C-alpha cells in the first residue's frame, strides 16, 4: 500500500483476502508510512493492524519476496501512487515495494497496480504504458455500477473484486450477463 488516496480499497482487499485464505499459500503486506497516515485520515482508524498478515517495513530488503527465489507469484499495489508507478516503470528499486515489483516483473509473474490518481498527465500515461509493456497490469480504481452498489463500500468493492479476478482468485461477485442479472 502506498500513500495514494484510496485506503478503502486496501481495507476491502485485506478483508476479502482474509476470507479467501484457503486460496493462497502465503501473503505479506508492505505499507508505507504515508499509506498509514492516509488510512488514518480516510478511514479514521488504524484497523490495518488488526489483520493477521505479516507486515514488512519499506526498508526490509531481507523480506522473502525481495528475491525471485521467494516464489511469490502475484503482487498487488493498492492504492498505487503515480510516484511508485514511475519508480517501478523506470527500474528504480529504492524501497521494498519497488524492489518486490521489480522481482515480480523480472520473474514474469503477475503485478497489478491499482492507480487511483486522476487525471493522468503524459508522464503517468507513458509510465503506465512502460509497465504494461513490461508485463504489469494497470487497473485504475474505477468502480462499476452494473450491480447498483448502494454504499461507498459496495462501490469500492467493484474495484477490489476486479483486482481479485485479475489475481486469479475465485470469488462470488456480480457478473455481467445477457439477462442483466
Image (spheres, grey):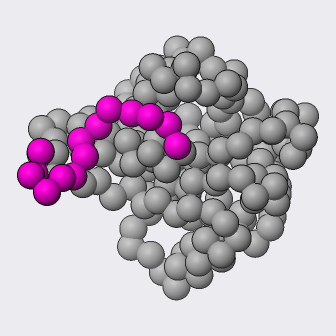
Secondary structure character of the magenta stretch overall: loop
The residue range painted magenta reads 168-181
Between 89 and 170, which is closer to the camera in this rendering? 170
Would residue 46 be counted in the magenta stretch? Answer: no
Q: Identify the image quadrant of the N terminus.
A: top right
| Quarter location, residue 131 | bottom right
**Residue 102 visible somewhere in the drawing:** no
Q: Residue at x 72, y 47 (%)?
A: 97
Picture coordinates of residue 31, whole percent (x, y): 63, 36
Between 79 and 15, which is closer to the camera in this rendering? 15
| Quarter location, residue 58 | top right
Q: Residue furthest front?
A: 178
Between 146 and 180, which is closer to the camera in this rendering? 180
Q: Residue at x 59, y 78 (%)?
A: 129
Q: Residue at x 85, y 37 (%)?
A: 70
| In-image side of 37 versus 91 (left or right) | left
Number of numbered callouts drawn: 0
Amino acid at each position: 500500500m502506498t500513500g495514494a488516496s484510496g485506503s478503502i480499497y486496501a481495507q476491502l482487499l485485506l478483508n476479502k483476502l482474509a476470507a479467501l485464505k484457503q486460496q493462497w499459500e502465503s501473503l505479506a503486506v508492505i505499507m508505507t508510512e504515508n499509506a498509514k497516515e492516509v488510512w488514518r485520515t480516510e478511514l479514521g482508524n488504524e484497523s490495518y493492524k488488526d489483520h493477521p498478515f505479516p507486515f514488512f517495513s519499506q526498508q526490509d530488503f531481507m523480506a522473502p519476496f525481495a528475491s525471485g527465489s521467494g516464489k511469490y507469484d502475484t503482487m498487488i499495489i493498492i492504492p498505487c501512487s503515480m510516484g511508485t508507478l514511475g519508480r517501478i516503470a523506470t527500474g528504480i528499486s529504492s524501497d521494498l515495494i519497488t524492489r518486490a515489483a521489480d522481482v515480480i516483473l523480472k520473474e514474469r509473474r503477475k503485478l497489478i497496480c491499482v492507480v487511483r490518481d486522476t487525471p493522468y498527465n503524459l508522464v503517468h500515461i507513458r509510465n503506465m504504458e512502460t509497465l504494461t509493456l513490461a508485463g504489469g497490469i494497470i487497473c485504475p480504481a474505477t468502480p462499476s455500477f452494473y450491480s447498483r452498489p448502494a454504499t461507498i463500500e459496495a462501490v469500492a468493492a467493484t474495484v477490489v473484486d476486479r483486482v481479485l479476478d485479475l489475481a486469479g482468485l475465485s470469488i462470488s461477485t456480480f457478473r455481467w450477463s445477457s439477462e442483466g442479472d
